[in-house]
Image (cartoon, rainbow, N blue to C red):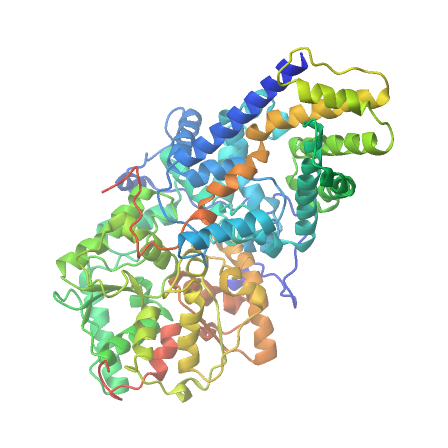
Amino acid sequence: MLTYLTYTVLVVFVAGFLWKIILYARSPAPLLIPTTPAPVTKGGVRLRLIREVVFFESLFKADKLLWALGYAFHITLALVLVRHIRYFFERMPPYFEHYQIIGQLAGVAMVGALGLLWARRFLIDRVRHISSKADHLILVLLLGIGVSGLLMDYVLRPDIIAIKRAMTTLWTSPAAALSVTGPGDVIFILHLAMVFVLLLIIPFSKLTHMEGIFFSPTRNQVDNPREKRHVNPWSAD
Amino acid sequence: MANDHEVPEIHDDIETPALKPGSMGHLSPYPALEKHMKPLGFPDARVPEWEKRGVEKLGEMLKKYRSLQVYMDICVKCGACTDKCHYFLGTGDPNNMPVQRAELMRSVYRRYFTAAGRMFPGLVNARDFNEETLNLWFTYYHQCSQCRRCSLYCPYGIDTAEISMAAREIMDAIGVGHKYTTEIVAKVHDIGNNLGIPKPALSGTLQFLEDDMLENTGHEIKLPLDQEGAEVLLVAPSADFFSEPHIQSLMGYAKVFHQAGISYTISSYASEAANFGMFIGSFEQKKKIAKRIAEQARALKVKRIVVGECGHAWRVAYSFWNTLSGPFDYLDPRYPVPQHICEFTHDLMTRGALKFDKGANDDYVVTMHDSCNVARASRMGPNPGGQFTIPRDLIRATCNHFVDMDEDTIHEKTLCCGGGGGLLTDELMDLRIQGAAPRVTALKKVIKEHKVNFLALICAICKAQFNKMLPMYGIPMETVGGVHQLVSNAIQLGANKGIV
């Protein structure tokens, strides 16, 4: 059951993710519309995209507080995800033990950042106005995942040995299953269920920004219209 | 006129207003007339089953524009753009926040093109394309000047200009057009320019200006029309031929050509740099209008094309011409095609072909308003940001007193004049007044601190808009002028004629 469910979720996620990438990549760009000043070489454009994705350059220009919260969330999420690697492999290199504390602190910071990002949606009148139910629910989902994770870390520990066994065997054995021996295990099942929901909605919601940014013409085009003729594929003559 | 409109009070700094929902909901532009829609190939009245047709057209646009497809999907509604639009800053209407303006289309996109919107419209804010939605579109997609300030600050570069252009094209396709812009595009095809100036009138006015310059300078400075074999085709916004202060810049261009000894011509057939095809979002119209100029460049056998002071025209010329009406392999490859008049003058200046007497502009303390399409959608010279340095170099070379406005309101962060994007029409006056307020705030600050009395710029629409706005805000109309007006004042005629 766990095996089939996991594979189904992953297939939907990967297929949806690829579908969006293919959709964006195949949509034509009739005109050059980079937001200028823009790089005049391809290498420059790569750097611009890296600055956007790694440092959130434009957001930094726009709103320092939002940048700080958004950046904190994304960075800590990455750190937390790295910590999760250990649940999927039988043996980890010994130095990975030292990473534990970083991952744990990141988890706390992530939930904090999410909480403040959610608070923005209530406290700032402009942001409250633009927030739909879906915008709130996505934050609730992420918070749910984060809080359940912290609960397992600090309050209600699940049977981690059993979970790790399930996680390492489910790829090959349909018999892999989760057992419930205490409240921590229930929290874990909730945690996993919410992660599955998140994976399922990524390609079909605003969370698709993670791929979309690379296809944003105002950011990924070279500013060289005079030097190199850009042809509109649907009006080429 | 000024008495009929409420002019907001200007504070020391630009302040983010509290939300005033629906405060601009009443202000729609005049609908297009049958006689203007027809020649553009648009239905002259609302088509049957327009709701269905509108959604179909949106589907077609999504397949034609990656920008639209990506921008419909990826907004996370972070709110970074919410305090960046001059129309929001001026009006407080939440539908003038870029994210919310885009939401008017995004909600329709979700309803018809996403699973979540089909299944749970209430949850994800999905909206039917109906009379109410269309009204909101017609109102608020004509309260966007396509200035792209939001695209600068958006973490994903979402460009509301792309969305409002698409919305206008969708509305045109169902027979719901905007009078001002469609009338102007129709006029370009009919007569050759936005103002509808026929050849005899154009030739008369050029003659008059030549006489005027002869009288004032003692030099025979020409404004040649339809002269085959000239080196350069000069394409200026038609306002340069008839409006103040635009005309001052036209004389500036003429003096530069005269002093450099470079032959040039204006074309009566392509007597318009502006391309309102962009404002209505139509690729086909953009292309048709651009082709008029390329055709004339061939017919007049020129070697170069130089574009006058016009913001969106420079975007179309610089960024789009090569796609729309290129390649320009019949022109001299040693020069960029097209060239901005500021690049042209700057190049001559650095090569020593022009001499300026800065003292001629000593009455002025100058500041520069960067026009949005030049600032955020084009370039001058070989380096990014040349669109800021080249005109400023010209100002500094021709004036002794120059000061910039607040750094958050210049260069790529510049604020729209409030009249761009096809909104320079009287029925939208309240929007134009309130949209100009953020720029006026920054201007008033340098007026107070540095006694600035000249607002230099390179856009025909900005000039016309400020000409009307500044007096309403208690600033003299003469404050507005072109960069080439300063060039015109300072240029030393006959100093060392010709290129060295």
Residue occupying image coordinates x 35% and y 55%:
A224
Q: In this picture, is A62 found above or below B241?
A: above
Q: In this picture, is B498 found above or below B238?
A: below
- Direction from residue B94 to residue B177 in the image, left or right: left
Q: In this picture, is A174 found above or below B163?
A: above
Q: Nearer the viewer, residue A113 or A108?
A: A108
Q: Is residue B423 visible?
A: no
Q: Nearer the viewer, residue B62 or B207?
A: B62
- Direction from residue B110 to residue B11 in the image, left or right: right
- The percent position of residue B303, horizontal first and vertical second, equals 18, 64
- Direction from residue B364 to residue B443 in the image, left or right: right
Q: Is residue B45 visible?
A: yes
Residue occupying image coordinates x 20% and y 75%:
B262
Residue occupying image coordinates x 44% and y 31%:
A22
- The percent position of residue B349, horizontal first and vertical second, equals 32, 79
- The percent position of residue B52, horizontal first and vertical second, equals 42, 24
